[in-house]
Amino acid sequence: MACRELERATFPEEAVATEVNEWVVPVKLNVLKDRELTKRHRVPWTPAFLFVDAEGVEQHRFMGYLPPDEFSAQIHLAAGKDAFAKGDYGAARRRYQDLVDRYGRTDAAPEALYWTGVCDFKLTKDESKIYDRCREVVQRYPGHIWAKKLGFIK
């Protein structure tokens, strides 16, 4: 059911298609036919979206149907995580900030905002950068799980 909704509502959306074409090489697997790959990547159910880098290392994953804006935000989050894992904190920060700017109302935005602070710290070694972003997450997204994670920072 969710897969059909993705095919009908999410994938045809122009913004999603643009994001996929720019950042993703999509591979569609059938969990009943491609058992070895789904087992290797620990895909328990569908739809599942795994973002792996050129070396096959998983950088991000999510499961289930998402509407277009949430889906696009997850692509940005994956791109940010990939750049961060490679030590390219400037590129990671740009991906995360772009997510916040374009998809600020999505569930991925608070996490991306947090990671902009981590990238700023990595780039400048200024601890205040990360604490400022943490406080911003708590202020902008009260009640979100990321605000709860960071609520200890005053």
Image: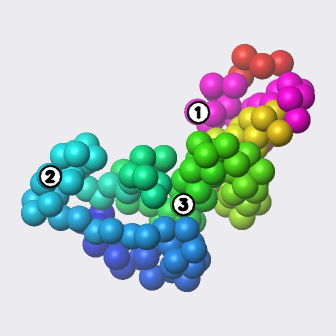
Residue picked out by circle 1: 145
Looking at the picture, tell me which residue is in the foreground, 146 or 93: 93
The residue segment tinted magenta is 124-150
Q: Main secondary structure of the magenta part?
A: helix
The residue singled out by tag 3 in the image is: 75
In this figure, which residue is indicated by the disc labeled 2? 36
Residue count near mark 3 (Cα–Cα under 10 Å), binned few <14, some 14–19, many ≥20: many
Q: Would residue 136 be seen by someone viewing this image from the given angle?
A: no
Tag 3: amino acid: Ile
The residue depicted at 38 percent of the width and 56 percent of the height is 49
Question: Amino acid under label 2?
Answer: Glu
The residue tagged with tag 3: helix, strand or loop?
helix
Q: Viewer-nearest of labels 2 and 1?
A: 2
- Rendering quarter of residue 3: bottom left
Q: Secondary structure at mark 2?
A: helix
Instruction: Give the camera-side residue of 105 and 44.
Output: 44
Q: Position of residue 135 (x, y in %)?
A: 81, 30
Dividing the picture into quarters, in which one does residue 115 lie? top right
Relative to residue 104, is residue 7 drawn left or right?
Answer: left
Q: Is residue 126 visible?
A: yes
